[in-house]
């Protein structure tokens, strides 16, 4: 099978690149740019004609769309561009996929929900985004579904990895150079190691019949606050910082972030046999990789 991966130089794309090294499938890793020495095919997914040409020339069977506008704060003042990347672009991919007989795995977010509940959110609960980022990602889900190509939409949350900028990297730095760090405890969710999500995607690619379309959720197992997550990072890294809990109101933001975004993962296990790892064990794996120079 020929699998095209968009956003290949982001956290998830790099994780798929690493895990797919021994796969029997052929992967075409694409992005709008690439670091020196990284083999990546140029693809502007906002250009429908270019997308169609690449799908045809590479004989693509499956698209894995990891590309997105993920700057949650900036999206509030840059919603038009966020909409282009989070809705128009996946719509281009999905419509071209239908035309060329492809299927698509599309990555979405917990931000499509309002985060006001207190029990794990199922994949078919009614979305109600409270931010520009959430609105544009929900629009992208609709564009994929409306294309009528076979799809799996995977919503995830709190993604971190060895690659690029993320909460883990930020906390590693802050707890190393500061005596005290404040982190909010009134936002609860589930950390997601990008390598675990990448493994889930590769599992789905292997077992999905590419006929039935599905929405499912994937994060690592467990429900914690950002404060809990930061405290564990501090402890596992051996730093001596005093991590203190605080309220979201102490860090005013133009983004109305979900206060509860724990996602129900049962359907991805039942449908595809995906194993959902414990978040603490995955954090240790990621930290060990960073110590060994993977980043």
Image (tube, rainbow, N blue to C red):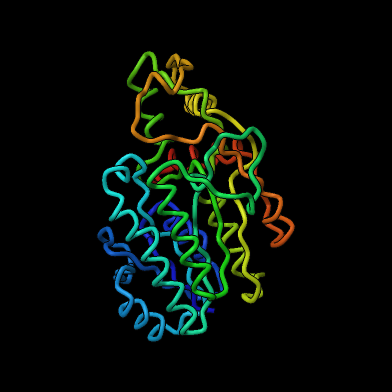
Q: Quadrant of residue 271?
A: bottom right
Whether residue 56 can be seen here: yes
Residue at 50% from the left image edge and 39% from the top image edge:
288
Q: Nearer the viewer, residue 179 or 110?
A: 110
Q: Position of residue 24 (x, y in %)?
A: 56, 74
Q: Is residue 109 left or right of residue 67?
A: right
Q: Is residue 69 left or right of residue 202?
A: left
Residue at 49% from the left image edge and 54% from the top image edge:
108
Q: Quadrant of the N terminus?
A: bottom right
Q: Quadrant of residue 57?
A: bottom left
Residue at 40% from the left image edge and 54% from the top image edge:
136
Q: Position of residue 241 (x, y in %)?
A: 42, 16
Residue at 34% from the left image edge and 83% from the top image edge:
53
Whether residue 235 can be seen here: no
Instruction: Work out whether 67 lies above or below 221.
Output: below
Q: Position of residue 171 (x, y in %)?
A: 40, 29
Instruction: Work out whether 119 lies above or below 17.
Output: above
Q: Nearer the viewer, residue 88 or 58?
A: 88
Q: Nearer the viewer, residue 8 or 155?
A: 155
> Quick one: which residue is furthest to the right in this view?
270
Q: Position of residue 280 (x, y in %)?
A: 60, 35
């Amino acid at each position: 099978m020929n699998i095209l991966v968009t956003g290949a130089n982001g956290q998830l794309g790099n994780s798929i690149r690493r895990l797919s090294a021994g796969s029997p499938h052929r992967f075409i890793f694409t992005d709008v740019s690439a670091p020196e020495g990284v083999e990546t095919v140029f693809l502007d997914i906002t250009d429908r004609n270019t997308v169609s040409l690449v799908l045809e020339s590479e004989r693509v069977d499956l698209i894995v769309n990891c590309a997105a506008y993920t700057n949650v704060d900036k999206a509030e003042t840059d919603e038009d561009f966020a909409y282009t990347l989070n809705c128009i672009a996946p719509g281009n991919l999905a419509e071209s996929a239908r035309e060329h007989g492809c299927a698509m795995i599309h990555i979405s977010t917990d931000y499509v929900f309002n985060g006001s509940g207190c029990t794990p959110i199922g994949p078919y609960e009614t979305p109600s985004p409270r931010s520009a980022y959430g609105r544009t990602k929900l629009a992208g889900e609709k564009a994929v579904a409306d294309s009528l190509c076979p799809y799996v939409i995977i919503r995830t949350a709190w993604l971190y990895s060895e690659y690029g900028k993320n909460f883990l990297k930020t906390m590693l730095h802050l707890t190393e150079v500061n005596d005290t760090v404040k982190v909010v405890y009134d936002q609860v969710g589930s950390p997601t190691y990008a390598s675990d999500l990448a493994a889930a995607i590769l599992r789905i690619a292997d077992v999905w019949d590419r006929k039935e379309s599905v929405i499912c959720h994937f994060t690592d197992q467990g429900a914690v606050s950002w404060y809990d997550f930061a405290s564990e990072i501090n402890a596992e890294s051996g730093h001596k910082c005093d991590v203190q809990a605080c309220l979201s109101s102490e860090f005013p933001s133009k983004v109305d972030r979900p206060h509860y975004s724990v996602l129900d993962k049962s359907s991805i296990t039942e449908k595809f046999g995906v194993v959902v790892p414990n978040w603490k064990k995955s954090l240790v794996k990621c930290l060990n990789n960073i110590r060994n120079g993977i980043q």
